[in-house]
Amino acid sequence: MNVSQVISFFTPSILVVEILLAEFLFVKSVPKRPYFWLIFLLCGFTSIYITIFTEIAYSSIMHKWFTYGDSISTDQIVGTSIFNLFFYLLIFLMTILTVFLSFKIKFTQALFLCSGGYALQHIARSITRLCTIPNYFYENPIGPYMSLVVEFLIFAVIYLIFYFFFIKKFSNDIERNADNLRKAIMAFVVTIVCIGMSRLTIDIPEQQTVISIISNSVYAVLCCGLIISTIFDIKKNENMALEVDMMSEILRNERKQYELSKENIELINIKCHDLKHQIASLRHDGSEKNIQEIEHAIMIYDSAIKTGNDELDVLLTQKKLICDSHDIQLTCVVNGKLVSFMDNFDVYALFGNAISNAIESVEKIADKDKRCVNVIARKVADMLIIHVENYFRGDLELKDGLPVTSKDTNYHGFGMLSMKRIAEKYGGELTVSLKGDIFNLDIIIPFKKAE
């Protein structure tokens, strides 16, 4: 065997390493099993051993060395191509098993993500074939060695580019987005078909020309790139579906809270009205001091805010009770009639989330003069302007124009996201800003959208 044949013989073993590295990039953020490196390396070396053993068995049966990428005679095309297809399928399955045994991951997740890894490896392999077409790599004595150097550099560059610009952005969503049998099987089948067709084409000797190599390599890159793109799109769609489900659950809870708050406020108003009459009758027998204390306590619950909108009245009264109990001053300059074109629940959710966030922020401030929340809703030209401001302590970090909260850095607060979507529903927009130590939330909605 010459140098080229030796390198070709060990190429499938190198292929195992390349695929495992690509798959590792896709599952890097997934929790690892105990003794991870021991299991990973043991399974990896076992896969390489099985690969070499399969090549030796093939060589014994066919009475010739197995050589990667070499064309074959016409009378052996079908049999050898089928063997090659199943051989590389075996390699792929062994790498999937290695990932599954090394990481705390379901098999469907391993199948899905490893398909992306194999596609990435095949992209790098195809680009390597394009870059090693010149005769220099075949006719020069050191050509095979230079080919290995070029292959290493190309794989390193492509893997790093894909990891930092694509894979890393989705690392936080890997576990929940890949856990779907239908998606896993689809990704696996498409990957095998794409790479299998490329493999069968390479094995046909009549097509081993420069043009065929270029066209086959470009085809493989495009197909595998489409596979990876589809995987990322699936993840994106799954994220959106999950976000919608969580938003729906939050909205259902807010609606229940609204109904409960409305009933509570109505009940409190009725009780306050009855107590007023009872106090009037007590003036003839009770002490004036005790009666005044009772009246003061009742006035706290009887100070319902009137804006001209029943939903806002219920909400603002409820929030005022919360603020009074936490020594927070709530100031409202709100014309409730301006929001009459909006759905009642949208009004409740929009103002409720905005005021709740403001209360949560000022609760952390010890200075009583800064424990205040201001709410304004007014008309400017043909626009509804909603402004909520409160004192804020700490640094404000924004992501996609919304504050990132400590509760959930992935979704930067579903309350804020809910408000943003309600504003956009009516053709408006939401903006936030921090001026000094004052946090400003502004919502602008055109009235014409309600017509």
Image (tube, helix red, strand yellow):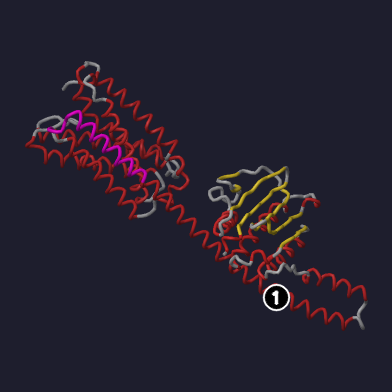
Give the image location of residue 28, x and y in percent: 43, 40
Q: Quadrant of the C terminus?
A: bottom right
| Image quadrant assignment for residue 384 | bottom right
The furthest residue to the front: 381
74 in relation to 253, above or below: above
Furthest residue in direction left, as rendered: 75
The reply, left or right, for residue 445 in relation to residue 83 is right
From the top left corner, tell me how far across and down residue 336 is, in percent.
69, 65
The prevailing secondary structure element of the residues shown in magenta is: helix
The residue sitting at the top extreme is 141
For badge 1, the amino acid type reads Glu
Q: Position of residue 278 (x, y in %)?
A: 83, 82
Q: Label 1: which residue?
A: 266
Asked whether 221 falls inside the magenta stretch, the response is: yes
Is 352 positioned to the left or the right of 116 in the image? right
Element under label 1? helix
Residue 300 within the segment the image draws in magenta:
no
Q: Give the image location of residue 218, x and y in percent.
A: 27, 35
Q: Which residues fall within the magenta stretch?
A: 205-229
